[in-house]
Image: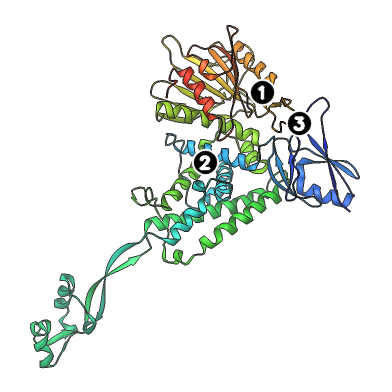
Amino acid sequence: MSLQLHRLRASGQEAPQHVWTHEPLTLQGEGEWLLKGPAVLLQQAAQGLGGFYKATGSDSAILAFGNAVGRFEAPGLGPLSVVSGKWGEEHFDRMLADLMRVAASLPFSIGDRALMPFDHSVVQQGEVLYHAFVYLRHVLSDSAPRDAQLLPALRLVLAEPHRILESEHRSIPSEQARGLDARGLVRIMEQPHHWSAVPWALAERSALASALKQHLPRQIEERATLATHDTAENRFVKAFLDLAASVIQGIRKAVAGLPSRTFVPRILKDCDWMEQALQPIRTHTLWKQVGRLHQLPVLSTVLPKRLGYKAIFGHFSKLRMASTCLPLSAAEITQLLEVKDITLMYELWTYFTLVEQIRRRLGPPIEARSVQSEPLESNARRGLLVRWPNGVEASFNTTYSRSSKNGRRSYSLMLRPDISLWLPDDTEPRLHLFDAKFRLKWKAPKKDDDIERASSFQNEDLHKMHTYRDAIAQVRTAWSLYPGDEFICYRADGVLIELPHELGPDAEGIGAIPMRPGDTEELLSMVLGRLMGTPGL
């Protein structure tokens, strides 16, 4: 008995071919899959695939993964690796690492950057817990970039732990003493009742016995210098390990209360391997010599400079601000936690990538803060705003509506583009909008022997850019950001532009910009340079 899996294609649509491998089986998340086989095996598969599984009969079911990527365990089929286009779990993790790196460098206000406590109270804060778990899972995985992985930094600390020299005074038999300082001499003179008579011959050889009239103290207080690993920096690392453990344990408790138990086995499996990865570090004998941390050593010169410690402190900084730098609701962060929703991650990544490209041109921003959507909105989302000294502003999830009183106004329907970029001008600021669209269409190959097919934007996404230009008066350009290959700009004067360097700072129109982690950020950078009037930077 076995299960059979067949690809279902929507009528009139062409999708990229799925990739078949032995371990695991790789499936395209777009579209649907028909699963057929004995009822007992289908029931087992349903337990592993949960909400992605929909029974259609006693011997068949439909699998629909939507925006999810990653690995799934399906009894009867074995492990499945779900990808979206050519994007898989490694792309999801790469984008997460990029946006956390950029977010950690932003100047969030004190109110937005509350310290995550070094105790188990973190498990009581749902959004903090979910954000922290998503980040911790990434930096513990092998898919994280080498310089972003947590385990090598922890192992480096264990191999070369920071130590300091401490002085202490101890009482030892006088015949074992090797030196005597001022404090020891004072103690001797204060306690004559502890002196003992010594033979005359010994008194002649000892200046101390001679001075004490043929007496020596039974004990001498001697100063000793000892090396200790019980330092503030090692206490910090120990506390960080405890915090990581509390995050994992908190997730174990949290999933028990989820309204749907679809992803519980997957999350618990993540918890298992994360705990196993940390277990040799947490049980190392070094920590028996290290006490409890009571205060963050913010004045330490070791944490920000020494290898291992510097990386761990960086992870702590990102972990503690995880609930503020990602503008997500609890439901949305659950999508990242449970489903690995690559569409949602792509939206966030494009914003933080744009912020990083502006930073490279203008230097560090002067402000970064969370902003709330209008309180009367249904399904309100939190946004972000980053501002530079010259007045440039980049915001995420800004709402434009008829009732808006802050200048963010649409004359018709409520609109919420992903990214708003305000550039100062002599008369009024120039507004440029960017919308992340994690979808594309595939072009037919030019030659029969072409293996790779070019990917382009969806026409309906450009229609949405026209909507932004029409409804929001200040908009100069509106761009669709998508994971494809083709750049295009339709200028308002009818000129078609296919190369970013043909743009100018007064450009008006709509377009599409390809964006993929690691290889196409330069196109966005070129567009920003032209719009901002800094093309050569």
Q: Which of labels 2 and 3 is toward the front?
A: 3
Identify the residue under disc 1. Answer: 457
In the rendered image, the residue lying farthest to the top is 493
Q: Which of labels 1 and 2 is toward the front?
A: 1
Q: Which amino acid does label 1 sit on?
A: Phe
Identify the residue under disc 2. Answer: 322
Task: Pinpoint residue 273: horizontal percent, then vertical percent.
Answer: 62, 55
Instruction: Decide: is 107 above or below 302.
Output: above
Q: State how far apart marks 2 and 3 are (Cα).
A: 36 Å
Left or right: 146 in relation to 73: left
Asked whether disc 1 touches disc 2, contact meaning CB atoms under 8 Å apart, the reply is no
Left or right: 287 in relation to 70: left
Left or right: 122 in relation to 463: left
N-term-proximal mark, 1 vs 2: 2
Q: State how far apart marks 1 and 3 are (Cα).
A: 14 Å
Which disc, if any, is residue 15?
Answer: 3
Please tell me whether mark 1 sits on a helix, a strand or a loop: loop
Snapshot quadrant of residue 1: bottom right
Say if residue 278 shows up in the picture.
Answer: yes
For image coordinates 53% across by 21% down, the residue present is: 420
Instruction: Decide: is 380 above or below 151.
Output: above
Crowding at mark 1 (Cα within 10 Å: few <14, some 14-19, many 20+): many
Please tell me whether mark 2 sits on a helix, a strand or a loop: helix
Quadrant of the rendering where the C terminus is positioned = top left
Q: Which of 186 and 157 is in front in this view?
A: 157
Asked whether disc 1 touches disc 3, contact meaning CB atoms under 8 Å apart, the reply is no
Task: Pinpoint residue 309: horizontal percent, then vertical percent.
Answer: 42, 52
For image coordinates 33% across by 50% down, the residue present is: 301
Asked whether disc 2 touches disc 3, contact meaning CB atoms under 8 Å apart, the reply is no
Task: Pinpoint residue 52: horizontal percent, then vertical percent.
Answer: 76, 41
